[in-house]
């Protein structure tokens, strides 16, 4: 992470999501459907579902909404089958972008993602064209203002639970784990009553790209805004040093 704080960007995203909470609940509902389909409806035996439930609660999704989503996803023929598809491509200034989607219509999603890239002066590439520039990691972000725990104590709890890295920023703590270790570390922090702003698997850029040209910045924001508006898009990762 080397001093690069994502917290301001995370807060920006959260504010946008608060203004459109229904969209966030729809996105999480799709993740619940996929998790139930892959591992069953019992979170005690489905770590992916436990992670999605934790994400839902972090976004203030009501418990009854979560339970309805699980029941709907586990009902025979009662739920829509979503397919996870990842797109990779390039934005202005050589920026790398990864787009994770969950869709019930591949043609629609592919067209929308391509449109977003094209409108922002970028282009969709082949699978693997930029993902090698990222590391797949579990990422936990903790707001400094939300915890009174000493940084060293917090770090030891995380490392003892299997975390790979712990870093301090001015406004937050960031914990990185292997993708398969995220659940164990998140649950250890929950047991210690440590509130988490985010706890999910992310694609962490190995290096960041600076954009000095205002047109490039505007174009990249155009791509990101269009992707954000697409209901099929679950997550977008990029290596722009905002």
Image: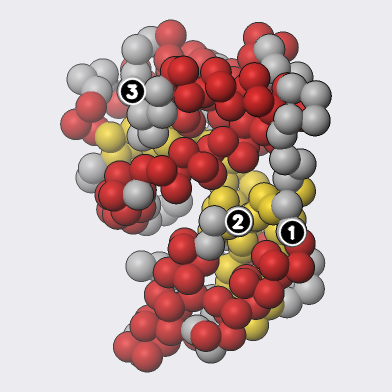
Across and down, in percent, residue 143 comes to: 28, 35
Pick the front one: 210 or 234: 234
Q: Earlier in the sequence, mark 1 or mark 2?
A: 1
Across and down, in percent, residue 41 comes to: 70, 17
Residue holding disc 2:
232
Residue holding disc 3:
195
Above or below for 189 versus 98: above
Q: Of the residues tagged 1 and 2, which is closer to the observer?
A: 1
Q: Secondary structure at mark 3?
A: loop
Residue at 50%, 84% in the rendered image: 120
Q: Quadrant of the C terminus?
A: bottom left
Q: Secondary structure at mark 1?
A: loop
Across and down, in percent, residue 227 comes to: 51, 66
Q: Are marks 3 and 2 in contact (CB under 8 Å)?
A: no
> Label 3: how many residues lie within 10 Å, few (<14), some (14-19) or many (20+)?
some
Q: Mark 1 to mark 2: distance in Å?
A: 9 Å
């Amino acid at each position: 992470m080397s001093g690069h704080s994502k917290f301001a960007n995370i807060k920006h995203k959260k504010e946008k999501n608060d203004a459109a909470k229904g969209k966030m609940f729809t996105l999480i509902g799709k993740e619940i459907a996929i998790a139930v389909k892959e591992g069953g409806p019992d979170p005690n035996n489905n770590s992916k579902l436990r992670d999605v439930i934790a994400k839902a609660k972090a976004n203030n999704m009501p418990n009854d909404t979560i339970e309805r989503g699980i029941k709907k996803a586990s009902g025979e023929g009662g739920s829509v089958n979503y397919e996870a598809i990842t797109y990779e491509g390039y934005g202005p200034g050589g920026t790398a972008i990864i787009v994770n989607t969950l869709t019930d219509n591949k043609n629609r999603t592919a067209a929308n993602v391509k449109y977003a890239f094209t409108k922002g002066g970028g282009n969709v590439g082949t699978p693997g064209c930029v993902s090698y520039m990222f590391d797949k990691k579990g990422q936990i972000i903790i707001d400094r203002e939300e915890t009174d725990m000493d940084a060293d104590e917090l770090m030891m709890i995380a490392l003892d639970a299997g975390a790979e890295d712990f870093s301090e920023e001015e406004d937050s703590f960031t914990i990185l784990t292997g993708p398969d270790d995220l659940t164990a570390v998140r649950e250890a922090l929950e047991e210690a009553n440590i509130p988490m702003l985010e706890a999910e698997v992310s694609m962490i850029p190995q290096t960041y790209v600076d954009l000095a040209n205002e047109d490039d910045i505007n174009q990249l924001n155009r791509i990101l805004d269009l992707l954000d508006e697409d209901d099929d898009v679950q997550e977008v990762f990029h290596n722009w040093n905002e």
